[in-house]
Amino acid sequence: MSENIVEIYDISYEGAGVGRINGQIVFVPKTLKGEKVRVRIARKLSSFLLAEVDEVLHKSDKRIEAKCPYFDQCGGCNFQHCQEDEERNIKLEIIKKELAKAGYFGEIGFEESDRRYAYRNKLKLEVLNGKLGFFKAKTREFFEIASCDIASKEINCAIPKVKTFLSQNNLQQLRSVYFKQVQNQLAICFLFPKGAENLVKNIKKLELFDFFSVFFAFGQVLESNYTKIFNIYGDSKLIQNIDKFEVPVDVSSFNQVNDNVAEKLYAYIETFCVGKRVVNAYSGQGLLTFRLAKSAKFVYGIEYQVSAHESAERLCNLFAGYKIENICGKVEEVLPEVLLKDRIDCIVLDPAREGCQISVLEAIVKSRLKEVVYVSCNFSTLVRDLRYLTEYYDIFSIKIFNMFPCCVNMETVAYLRRKGAV
Ligand SMILES: C[S@@+](CC[C@H](N)C(=O)[O-])C[C@H]1O[C@@H](n2cnc3c(N)ncnc32)[C@H](O)[C@@H]1O
């Protein structure tokens, strides 16, 4: 069999090196620009090849030894093999190319995370035959892990306890385990399929979990209105201290994964909202709504997950002086009404990876709203939505927040102003 030697001349938007074999594009994860690598073809698709590195023949001077022993097989991290400044350059290059598709060629800001490792306050591990691990990149092939370098120290301390717990109980239905750290508290949530409630019994060795909070959840995913959650050990409440108040937060609701970057992100978004009437769409547990309400004139929060909305309401009640209205519903259904009844100056959109529904963008355009702050963890859907909005809005600034160091994902904030608005 002939050897496949590839020269990497670019990095794809998924973080893989790009080269050619006999003229055909090949994607080689975990390589860097300028490198020459010997590869094995993993998959042939009609218009490109996917390959794995067998040997790096010529190394980039930006290459470093990956910290994590699972880096080669894991689908989680993309950039442990390069220096931090190279990761920043790659991310900026990726986003620059993507934003050009929406007609943006201006400056791009970059806010770094204080930590490159141990930053994740939540982690989802898969379970197979009582073992804990991840799936290999782009497959359902399971591998077991002992720790995860980008997860917090506390989460890594909990992994061995969960392993012991699994070895002491016969939890055949168990699909995944979620770890969620809220300040100094840790919650562990075991996710079973819906309907498995009666099969999960005679649970032993819960005391292994000391001061952790343990939950059993039944459903497809944790963050859902249809998942039933039971606290089976430890404190049922997770408490976040905000401005000297103890605010109960919900184990099944969305939270930003990197506390340090989330703080910088929220502070930045706030700068666009001072003294304005604001809609915070896709508002989760209301932490950003609360933050914006400190300096805005009024903030509407719109969120469809009931438990997240309830958390947002609790937060709102604690800070009764703040002008907030939380609405539980789908943004696509609620937003047109809010825009009709009130004169909104600025909308903050922070949708899930799927981006905004077209009807949401249509409602914004129709209302002639002046300012849009679009926060996104998925630049493909961000660019799709910006392409629609830029017919009516100009992009004034773009800033990346490195919420997910070592991974190709990034949080991007686009600030848009209505064309011709003063
Ligand atoms: C990326 S999170 C943002 C949360 C919030 N901005 C924060 O910083 O915590 C997206 C949120 O949108 C909610 N969501 C997703 N689709 C929605 C929809 N169509 N209408 C309302 N909320 C939605 C999810 O439940 C989730 O809480």
Image (cartoon, rainbow, N blue to C red):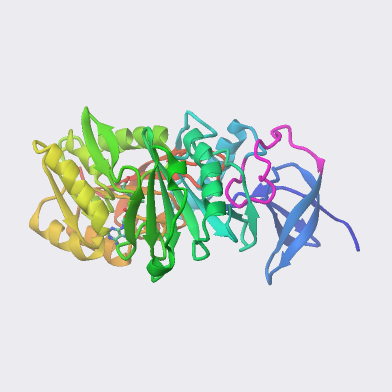
Question: Can residue 298 be seen here?
Answer: no
Residue 213 counted in the magenta span: no
Question: Which quadrant is home to the N terminus?
Answer: bottom right
Residue positioned 74% across, 36% down in the render: 60
Question: In screen coordinates, is 281 left or right of 165?
Answer: left
Residue 211 percent coordinates (x, y) = 39, 37
Tell me the quadrant of ligand 1. bottom left
Dominant secondary structure (helix, strand or loop) of the stretch shown in magenta: loop
Question: Can residue 249 be seen here?
Answer: yes
Residue positioned 21% across, 27% down in the render: 244
Q: Quadrant of residue 328?
A: bottom left
Please state which of residues 4 and 181 is positioned toward the viewer in this rendering: 181
Residue found farthest to the right: 1
Residue positioned 9% across, 53% down in the render: 342
User: Vertical placement of 44 versus 167: above or below?
Assistant: below
In the image, the segment drawn in magenta is: 56-79
User: Vertical placement of 407 versus 281: above or below?
Assistant: above
Residue positioned 15% across, 36% down in the render: 275
Residue 317 percent coordinates (x, y) = 12, 42
Residue 39 percent coordinates (x, y) = 80, 54
Residue 191 percent coordinates (x, y) = 43, 59
